[in-house]
Image: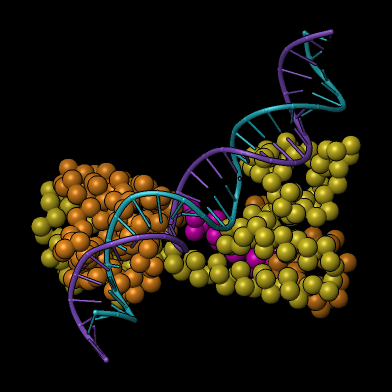
Chain colours: A orange, B yellow, C cyan, D purple
DNA sequence: GCTTGACCTAAAGTCAGCTTTAGGTATTAC
DNA sequence: GTAATACCTAAAGCTGACTTTAGGTCAAGC
């Protein structure tokens, strides 16, 4: 059993955020003793799932819906599975987009490294992909969707 | 040369967003003919960079600062390089976090698949990592930071 | 007994990033 | 000539996710 202050430290989240999550219904079964919230291992796992679903792009209201499904019992397993499968696809898509972002950043790092060496961008502005070093060319082409 | 409507279609961004970006100073050299914005290849590349920096976690005001550096010329190459290097580190960190999110989602997909097969969570609630299949155990442990 | 610190609430405030509204110009299509 | 369409501005409005504020309870330490 943990107080809100302990959970705050464990997860590195402000107390105000935990109270906000509770207000929004993200801890449906959270118990209290004389008004004070008592977090159990169940709420800690809920919090791990909340962080996971948030990072995967879900909004608070949708996380709430998921938590309500959990409280509803075995009749909602299918919906819960489908939610996780959908978020998996969303995260895989995001990973791919971030990969292309990284390609652009790699290209730009190379570009400014060269610009600094040259003292200007004259040589670089006319550059065709064919004139770039192997790895940079690949990154450039992926970043520009070619 | 492109009108704002053409750029909107090319990038899949609302016209209102492009005007907002312009208002926020993200196209420092954008020209106009009789009041109408004329986007050139330079603005298209700027837009690619904007999307890249935004996805990498930068705020509009910081992107604006970068665009101002570009307008300032060769004296800012170093700052620009450092910005891209910092964003590269940020994206690499985000990729790792997303990897752990994916681990959690993999675990939860497996979990609910099993719960559906079993018709309940009784067997699963007592489950130790040692009882899980190979790949799922690994995902579970990574997702839970163990 | 009184201060400190951890908890509580309801309600208002904040911030980023857009989007919408209201009103206007200029060109093309009929 | 008038209706539709694409452009323009300034300013207000919106949304999600918190955070802050103002005011209160309660137990522990001095």
Q: Is residue B20 above or below residue A132?
A: above
Q: In this view, does B78 lie above or below C14?
A: below
Instruction: Tell me what residue is drawn at x 84 percent, y 71 percent.
Output: B74
User: Which is more toward the observer, A40 or A91?
Assistant: A40
Query: Residue A96 in magenta?
Result: yes
Task: Name the side, left or right, on which A89 lies relative to B144.
Answer: right
User: Which is more toward the observer, A136 or B51?
Assistant: B51
Instruction: Tell me what residue is drawn at x 71 percent, y 52 percent.
Output: B24
Residue B123, position as x, y percentages in the image: 11, 60
Task: Name the side, left or right, on which A127 lies relative to A93.
Answer: right
Which quadrant is home to the N terminus of chain B? top right
Residue A67 seen in the figure: yes
Main secondary structure type of the part rendered in magenta: helix
Which quadrant is home to the C terminus of chain B? bottom left
Residue B39, position as x, y percentages in the image: 80, 45
User: Which is more toward the observer, A125 or B57?
Assistant: B57
Q: In this view, does B58 lie above or below B22?
A: below
Q: Magenta region: which residues?
A: A93-107
Instruction: Tell me what residue is drawn at x 75 percent, y 61 percent.
Output: B67
Task: Name the side, left or right, on which A105 lies relative to B106.
Answer: right
Residue B12, position as x, y percentages in the image: 63, 41
Residue B83, position as x, y percentages in the image: 67, 71
Instruction: Tell me what residue is drawn at x 66 percent, y 69 percent.
Output: B84
Res A6 → quadrant: bottom left
Res B97 → quadrant: bottom left
Farthest residue in the left direction?
B122
Query: Residue A140 in magenta?
Result: no
């Amino acid at each position: 059993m943990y107080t809100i202050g302990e959970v705050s430290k464990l997860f590195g989240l402000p107390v105000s955020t935990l109270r906000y999550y509770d207000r929004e219904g993200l801890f449906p079964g959270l118990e209290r003793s004389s008004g004070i919230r008592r977090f159990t291992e169940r709420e800690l796992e809920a919090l791990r799932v909340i962080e996971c679903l948030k990072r995967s792009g879900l909004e608070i209201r949708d996380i709430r819906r998921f938590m309500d499904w959990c409280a509803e019992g075995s009749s909602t397993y299918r919906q819960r599975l489908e939610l996780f499968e959908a978020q998996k696809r969303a995260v895989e898509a995001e990973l791919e987009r971030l990969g292309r972002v990284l390609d652009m950043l790699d290209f730009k790092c190379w570009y400014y490294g060269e610009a600094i060496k040259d003292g200007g961008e004259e040589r670089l502005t006319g550059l065709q992909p064919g004139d770039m070093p192997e790895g940079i060319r690949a990154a450039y082409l992926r970043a520009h969707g070619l």
